[in-house]
Amino acid sequence: MRDPGLQPERTALAWQRTALAAAVAAVLLLRSGLIRGAPLEIAAAGCAAAVVVLWFIAVRRPPTTGSARHILGAATIAVAAAGLLTAIQVLLLP
């Protein structure tokens, strides 16, 4: 038996875990970027921090289908950009 009332709670918890992981990644990337003088890592930290900002927006706004899709899409792009910038920094610019 499914309880449809639990879906929003699971979604909120998933956003919370994602935002926490992004915040930790942002702090670690920023620290590493500042110590090593790596501008791409600092930019990746900004992308990870953008996920945290998007989480705040998602929590504060009343959910609508269109806005939720846009926020999720923006968060996906921010995470992908952070990963790409970090990979370029680590693999191509040691």
Image: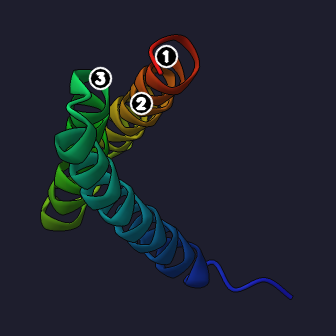
- Separation of marks 1 and 2 at Cα, in angstroms: 22 Å
Q: Residue 88 — which label?
A: 1
The secondary structure type at the circle numbered 1 is helix
Q: Nearer the viewer, residue 70 or 77?
A: 77
Say what amino acid the circle numbered 2 marks: Gly
Identity of the residue furthest to the top in this view? 92
Residue 41 location, quadrant: top left
The secondary structure type at the circle numbered 2 is helix
Scheme by which the image is coloured: rainbow
Q: Is residue 2 left or right of residue 48?
A: right
Pointer 3 residue: 40
- Up the image or down, 60 lies above or below 37; here it is below
- Separation of marks 3 and 2 at Cα, in angstroms: 22 Å
- Separation of marks 3 and 1 at Cα, in angstroms: 8 Å
Q: Residue 73 — which label?
A: 2
Q: Nearer the viewer, residue 24 or 2?
A: 24
Viewer-side label of 3, 2: 3
Q: Are marks 3 and 1 in contact (CB under 8 Å)?
A: yes
